[in-house]
Image (cartoon, helix red, strand yellow):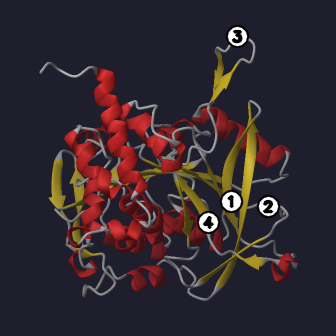
Amino acid sequence: MGVRPFYCRRATAATVLTVILTWAAPASALVSIFDKPLPRSSFVTKSLLVVGSTIQPSPAAAFASGASTSTTSAASLRRNDGINTDKTTIVYQPLSVTVSGVKVPVAAWHPPLKDSTTTSTMQPLNSYKHRISVQKIGKKLAGWNFIPSFANRNFDLLPGAQNSNLRVVTSIQQQQLPSSPVVILSHGYLGSRFDLYPLAETLASEGFLVLSPEYPESLADSFDAEIIDKNSGDIQTIIDRDMITNQLLSTLSQTWQVTPTSFGIVGHSLGCGTAERSGDDSWIRVCLAGFPSSRGNGSKCLFVGSTNDGAVSVNRELSVLSDNNYVNLDEDRIRSMIAEGQQFPPKSSLVFAGANAPNHISFLSEATNDAMVDFLSPLLPVARGLKIPVLDFDKYQLSRDSRAFGDVLTPLVVGYLKQTMKV
């Protein structure tokens, strides 16, 4: 027999995908005994202290709240970093901005206005509405345009899932946004506006206005980035990340009448590039599992990475850190600086190392990661067999470490932004 034509192989792949995805609900039933997460007590890693070209492991740090070390329990981090432990009300608003006539979703979290009584009339938020488009994933990772729309799934993400001290409320009508420090969250390739929502909730409880736009590469596939000319059928405009960020900033000041007291931006993976390009040197940047900022002129950036990241080259990260004079800190040093109000070096970094160090998507919320992995777990062996990149979802399928890592990462990032943005 000769080699089957491409269209036959494509049809076979489509049939396999369709059958698997049809059986994908409920997603929880797909997780076999081999997919169970590692015990949280086994999630122990080391951070790297990088001095020039020499990498020295710092003392081990246990991420699990049940692990017995004197420096790294999540409770002590929250206490040392001054993060509130009382029940705090924050407001969530599903907003949008219009770019080239297209509505682009923007998730917003913020504290209630000081003189506002509207929170008493608001309703508790039951869930964030999260969507996974298998069509978008297939198109972006494999160039497939034939996956049916019924393969897509909707998920409900629980607010306050990582912080039981928060009460999240919402309203049908849009509420006035506060003029406060503004932090933009920039998700990565095939991410979503909810990827970092536990961080967003905690930042809002500390007085920040947090805005998380949906970028064109989002797996939610909530808008078409290609604007087609109705007459010619040609592509007229392609909406990109910079267009969305610029429109968000314009809408923030002109339409929503917000006067930010300072700006910060947190990027994950591809979102680090967005963080690099957005704003001026007064903006505070946090780059997670991507590439560090190389801006000069006294701009400030905190970079957090991992040697266990299978999607980003650690050697390239370390090269950028060295070339841009980053001061590499360990967890203990960062915590003490936050607690004592010491000024961070303009360029600071923290790199985790070890077999159980976080992977590329450990930086994201547990809820969005679990939805993705549980739903697509039957496809991971197929993807590996076809040599399609899976962005460390196969690693996360085993580790399930987002919550444990988030208990360390969130206080560090919040403490850094509070200090550098003078909140």
> Within 10 angstroms of label 4, few (less than 14), some, or many (20 or more) residues?
some
Residue name at image x 77 percent, y 78 percent: 123
**Label located before the other in sequence (3 or 2):** 2
Q: Amino acid at mark 1?
A: Ala
Q: Pointer 1: what residue?
A: 108
The reply to whether the C-beta atoms of the residues labelled 3 and 1 are less than 8 Å apart is no
Amino acid at pointer 4:
Tyr
Query: Given contact means CB atoms under 8 Å apart, are the residues at marks 4 and 2 in contact?
Result: no
In primary-sequence order, the first of circles 4 and 2 is 4
**Of helix, strand and loop, which one carries label 2?**
loop
Q: Nearer the viewer, mark 1 or mark 2?
A: 1
Q: What residue would you read off at disc 2?
A: 177
Depth check, front residue: 396 or 287? 396
Q: How far across and how far down the image is residue 306, in percent?
A: 28, 55
Q: Is residue 167 above or below residue 419?
A: below
Disc 1 to disc 2, C-alpha distance: 9 Å
Q: For the point 23% across and 59% down, which residue is it?
A: 48
Q: Position of residue 391 (x, y in %)?
A: 33, 47
Q: Is residue 336 above or below residue 386?
A: below
Provide the residue designation for mark 3.
Answer: 232
Q: Nearer the viewer, mark 1 or mark 4?
A: 4
Query: Where is residue 80, by image quadrant?
Result: bottom left
In terms of secondary structure, where does tag 1 sit?
Answer: strand
Query: Residue tagged by mark 4?
Result: 128
For marks 1 and 4, give the CA distance: 12 Å
> Is disc 3 placed on a helix, strand or loop?
loop
- The residue under the point 41% across, 65% down is 27
Q: Residues within 10 Å of mark 3 (few under 14, many from 20)?
A: few
Q: Nearer the viewer, residue 295 or 288?
A: 288
Mark 1–mark 2 CB contact (< 8 Å) = yes
